[in-house]
């Protein structure tokens, strides 16, 4: 089995990513950072998870923002 030591997202769930991003940015700013309706129109963790699990391009954008977030908090 290949190790994931160079993957900073290894072991982090999509739910944890969203919880961390929402706590840091809030839904409003998150919707400004990533232009998807689940962050702008009546946002919730449940609806966002449902959408992101079905939509690879949106999940990729969220994961990229999370990597930027990790760099910011680890400065």
Image (spheres, rainbow, N blue to C red):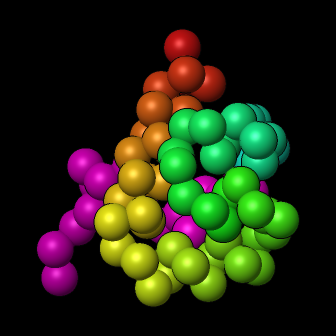
Residue 11 is left or right of residue 48, and the answer is left
Residue 10 visible in the displayed image: no
Q: Position of residue 28 (x, y in %)?
A: 76, 41
Q: Position of residue 6 (x, y in %)?
A: 25, 49
Task: Give the residue drawn at x 47%, y 42%.
Answer: 65
Position of 35 relative to 70 (above/below): below
Q: Position of residue 15 (x, y in %)?
A: 66, 70
Q: Where, by quadrant of the figure, is residue 58 drawn?
A: bottom left
Task: Give the residue drawn at x 56%, y 79%.
Answer: 51
Q: Magenta includes 4?
A: yes
Residue 5 is left or right of residue 45, and the answer is left
* Placement of the C terminus among the 4 image quadrants: top right
Label tally: 0
Position of 7 relative to 3 (above/below): above
Return the residue nearer the eye: 31 or 72.
Answer: 31
Return the residue nearer the eye: 19 or 39.
Answer: 39
Task: Give the residue drawn at x 49%, y 82%.
Answer: 53
Position of 19 relative to 70 (above/below): below
Task: Give the residue drawn at x 77%, y 48%.
Answer: 27
The stretch in magenta equals 1-21
Q: Magenta includes 55?
A: no
Residue 17 is left or right of residue 5, and the answer is right
Return the residue nearer the eye: 73 or 48.
Answer: 48
* Placement of the N terminus among the 4 image quadrants: bottom left
Q: Main secondary structure of the magenta part?
A: loop
Residue 9 is left or right of residue 49, and the answer is left
Residue 72 visible in the displayed image: yes
């Amino acid at each position: 089995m290949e190790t994931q030591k160079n993957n900073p997202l290894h072991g982090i769930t999509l739910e944890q990513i969203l919880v961390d991003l929402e706590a840091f940015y809030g839904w409003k700013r998150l919707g400004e950072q990533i232009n998807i309706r689940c962050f702008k129109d009546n946002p919730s963790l449940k609806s966002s998870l449902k959408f992101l699990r079905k939509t690879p391009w949106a999940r990729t954008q969220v994961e990229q923002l999370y990597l930027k977030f990790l760099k910011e908090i680890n400065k």
